[in-house]
Image (spheres, rainbow, N blue to C red):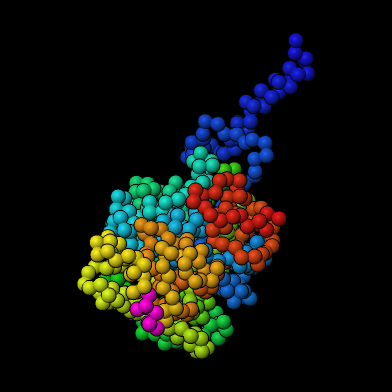
Amino acid sequence: MLHSGFRRSVWAFLVLSISLPVLAQTRNAATEQKRPAPAVASRTPGFPNRPKLVVGIVVDQMRYDYLYRYYDKYSNGGFRRMMTEGFNARNNHYHYAATYTGPGHAAIYTGSAPALNGIVGNEFYDRNLGRLVYCAEDSTVQTVGATGTAGHMSPRNMKSTTMGDQLKLATDGRAKVVGIALKDRGSILPAGHAADGAYWFDSKEGNWITSTFYRKDLPKWVQDFNARRLPETYVKQKWETLLPLEKYTESTPDDQPYEATLPGETKAVHPHEFVTVAGGSKFEALRTSPFGDEITKEFALAALKGEQLGQDNITDMLCVSFSSPDYIGHAFGTHSVEIEDNYLRLDRQLADLFAQLDATVGKGAWLAFLSADHGVADIPGFAKTYRIPAEVKTYGEVNDAVKKAMVDAYGPGNWTLSYFNQQVYLNLDFLAEKKVTVDDAYGVIKRALLKQRGVINVINLHRLGDEALPANLTPLFENIVHPNRSGDFYVLLQAGWFEGRTRGTTHGSTYAYDTHVPFLLYGWGIKPGQTLRRTSIADIAPTICALLGILEPSACIGDPVEEVFK
């Protein structure tokens, strides 16, 4: 016969086992109708608490030094709030050579590298398809929210999961994941495959749109936001400086010959007006202004309310990318009044976003991280005022020299497929037909290119172990080798040099100005601190996943930043 105390223990255990799933379902009735509960909803002992909402912030083209150059002018509620009350990984770098927007967003959210997630560039040559491919293109889907082709996009070219995907899997689909950016790739790649939605800006019609990959129609909150016609309001305004011009002491004077101009302007000076040129999109110029960040923030707040993010005990994720810093940086450069003014305004946009998160989700109940998809080079014209070596090569210089060298060595023929992202794509089938080896071609091409100005090395991506490179540089090239999508040889330019632009600047190199970007953590579970140990962009995803107690993305190669947990 069972002891009476034992019987009571068994009875108590059975009651507790029945009641625990009920107690765990803490959603309100309205939310439960939107998200069907799984068959079993229970927490096991020791299951980690989680924040109500994770907010991933990517500032497109934000170089690390912008955190400190404008620090004294930042408010207490934006960048400075994250830096002083959160954790700052101050020596955070990209771990691969292709420092572009698409790869950066993919790497942050997958914890992976182009070699595995497949996003080797904004565009890249796909050997299987035999053409250039845009990183987010998808001809099998349709635009939702506009009449053009701007919505023929999805994450299908990305071959691994994201943090958001893993959060979806960990919660049996009950978590909500939403991506937002002016750029389609800045929204789609972070949101991932399983997201509830990814939204981007169509500058032709001035609407936020998505694709049928996610849904067949726009949610009512997106329709309502579009109906506000904020772009119409912004495009009628001028971009005036936030402060008097003499206060921009971290910038060069507001009239430099090496800066680009907005459409319809003759000088790169304030105030900037938004002029629609013949054949142009009416709202395109808004991207290259602080109004682009403002509309992004406003749309993020609309998503916060419309999707009821962070309103229950199942963690949601909001991925927000601020794209305007990239457009402004490309046009005006790293030391312009425009870039300083934009960061001062963006700081205030972040402060507003954080205040709204405090009010709606609850202070201490949300977790945010901030990083950038790449850095940026100084404009060569600016660098040379300090006697720093820098210059621009035309896009055709390398490609023409490669073709000529191969024809001179082996005769006429289609020896190469493309030169893109500083990589030479050989026509391997044609080489095999002509019995020319990759090593033979490498010798011919390297000899020709090393005679060119600004070329410091030509790297054989097939034989990286044989290259005489600094130890920390070799992995950057290993991490971009995707046989069907990467090139055969990488053309390494001297520091400060880049291809294509005669005014403005760009990115895409292995140098510190392109690889060193912020990694800030703030909010739930984060204590103030910092580390100067070198960390990697690939470490962001596993750090967030460790905080959430979920599995890291499928192709993750990074490690959690241990100092965050101490």
Q: Position of residue 538 (x, y in %)?
A: 54, 58
Decide which of 441, 522 is in the foreground and name it. Answer: 441
Give the residues in magenta.
446-453
Does the magenta segment cover residue 341? no
Q: Position of residue 348 (x, y in %)?
A: 56, 68
Decide which of 427, 253 is in the foreground and name it. Answer: 427
Residue 282 visible within the image: no
Of all residues shown, which one is farthest toward the front? 435
Q: Position of residue 500 (x, y in %)?
A: 36, 77
Left or right, residue 183 beside residue 93 = left
Residue 488 visible within the image: yes
What's the residue at 71%, 55% (across, down)?
566
Left or right, residue 111 beside residue 200 = right
- Rendering quarter of residue 74: bottom right
Q: How many marks?
A: 0
What's the residue at 61%, 46% (across, down)?
549
Left or right, residue 469 beside residue 284 = right
Of all residues shown, which one is farthest toward the left? 412
Decide which of 263, 107 is in the foreground and name it. Answer: 107
What's the residue at 55%, 31% (across, down)?
40
Q: Quadrant of the N terminus?
A: top right
What's the residue at 43%, 64% (across, down)?
463
| 166 vs 272: above or below | above
Q: Position of residue 232 (x, y in %)?
A: 38, 66
